[in-house]
Amino acid sequence: MYRIMSADEAISLIRDGDCICVNSFVGIENPVELHEALERRYEQTHSPKHLTIVSSAGFGVWDENRAAEGYIRAGAVDRLICGHFGAMPSTKKIILENRFEAYNLPLGCISHAIRAQAGGIPGALSKVGLNLFVDPRREGPGINQISTDSSFVKLVMVDNEEFLYYKLPPVTVALIKGTAADRKGNISFDDMYMSGDALSICQATKSNNGIVIVQVDKIVDEPTRPRNTIIPGCLVDAIVVCEPEPRDEALTALTGSFEINYEQWGEWTEKLEALSSGNKQRSLAAHIIGKRAARELRKEDIVNIGIGIPETISHYARENGILDHITLTVESGGIGGFPASGKVFGAMIGAASVYDMANQFDLYNHGGLDICFMGALEVDRYGNVNAHRGPGAYAGIGGFANITAKTPTVVFCLTFNTKGLKVSREDDVITIEENGTIPKFVQTVSSISFSARNAIENGQKVLYVTERCVFILTARGLKLLEVFPGVDVQKDILDLLPFDIEP
């Protein structure tokens, strides 16, 4: 039977050595007050210690002084297993200092492994990750030098086919954020951007005789409608009521609290961008890429658009008149709206449906998308892509590996080089005024996020759209497909590549 507690009382239930699973998505819907209560306890007692924390999509809030960052820095955590670390600025840094073990697994594979554990199955099989960095025949999932545990990802054969077997430690504590608890302890998520893996996390925790702690905004007298309950009260041990952070109208719009028609998506996107102090003006190069990439969209396509340069595609999809003829999706579970970006990435404007994250990755893993648009840090001569690890920096793979694994058409959107690139355009004639000092096309990528070999075997169409040209993947590697007006093929492309390409 659940009890209503303070955050400090609820956190006192956590023991040394527990495996905590956090339901959040990059920077949204994190139970911040529970993390900060854990930090207070650790500062006072140096307990709980030797913690393992699992999160499909990461659990930061883009602030190194909030949420879990403090107690992670202080030494409470021995292991992190996450799909993405982007919203955790200080944690990303100290991972590379070998302060604790840290493992990066594809977001969808963590989500499915949690769901498997909820059903009493130790792990989950997947084709996603084969021949990528996470494959134990390559690097494996460990991020730093001390992360050598080989139990999380194993290569197995089933009916003479290769699979990766993803296995997580038994989850013993769930930290969840919901909207409201009714008098029976049932948890609804009405004012949340997403529900993520909440139900699976709770079921997995209870299957391991663990503790479920849920932070909510309020207690309501009337029972919620049964179909609106995400977590039934019988799975909840502690409910912590915390005053919600204020949200203005634009952020409230992302909860689905009121209807937003297609015609209003642009207006609400502008309102959200105005709220984001980190919002960057997209470069001309990014707009050239987005305009060309958007031409790959077809009516009735089911689509995923990544963050960064790919976000410009939506502008040109609207300009082309095709935006209202396609279905956009986001990894957190949203379908049929317009994905938000920046600090609220994972939320959607005008979503038609928001369901469990594991279900979204069912769609992605089996090729249920028609097309996806992704960024890239490096591309090599064979068409392999590194999108998750740069020099001295590590964001994590996130949902990238799942999204690109079987999608029939994959479009990578990247500048030809970076840091100092200057481009001009007049009447659609492009001039490369100055090249950047960091190449994006390299002899060998430093880590593989996307396997060209897999793509060829799967029969996928793969394009690499830059501000000066488009490459297509063939069995022999990259082939130059298009050169934009004004671009000198030899000087602006061939002379800058460290490898020969198919003519």
Image: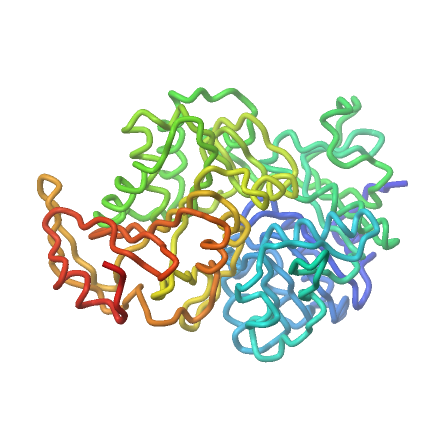
Left or right of 60 in this view: 229: right
Residue 171, image quadrant: bottom right
Quarter the N terminus occupies: top right
Residue 340 in the image: x percent, y percent?
Answer: 45, 38
Left or right of 415 in this view: 402: right
Callout count: 0
Please report the residue visible at 46 percent of the width from the left and 48 percent of the height from the top.
Answer: 459
Residue 426 in the image: x percent, y percent?
Answer: 9, 43
Nearest the eye: 232 or 204: 204
Q: Is residue 343 above or below residue 302?
A: below
Please report the residue visible at 38 percent of the width from the left and 47 percent of the height from the top.
Answer: 411
Residue 265 in the image: x percent, y percent?
Answer: 40, 27
Residue 191, image quadrant: top right
Nearest the eye: 210 or 449: 449
Please report the residue visible at 61 percent of the width from the left and 55 percent of the height from the top.
Answer: 127
Quarter the C terminus occupies: bottom left
Nearest the eye: 220 or 154: 154
Q: Is residue 73 above or below residue 377?
A: below
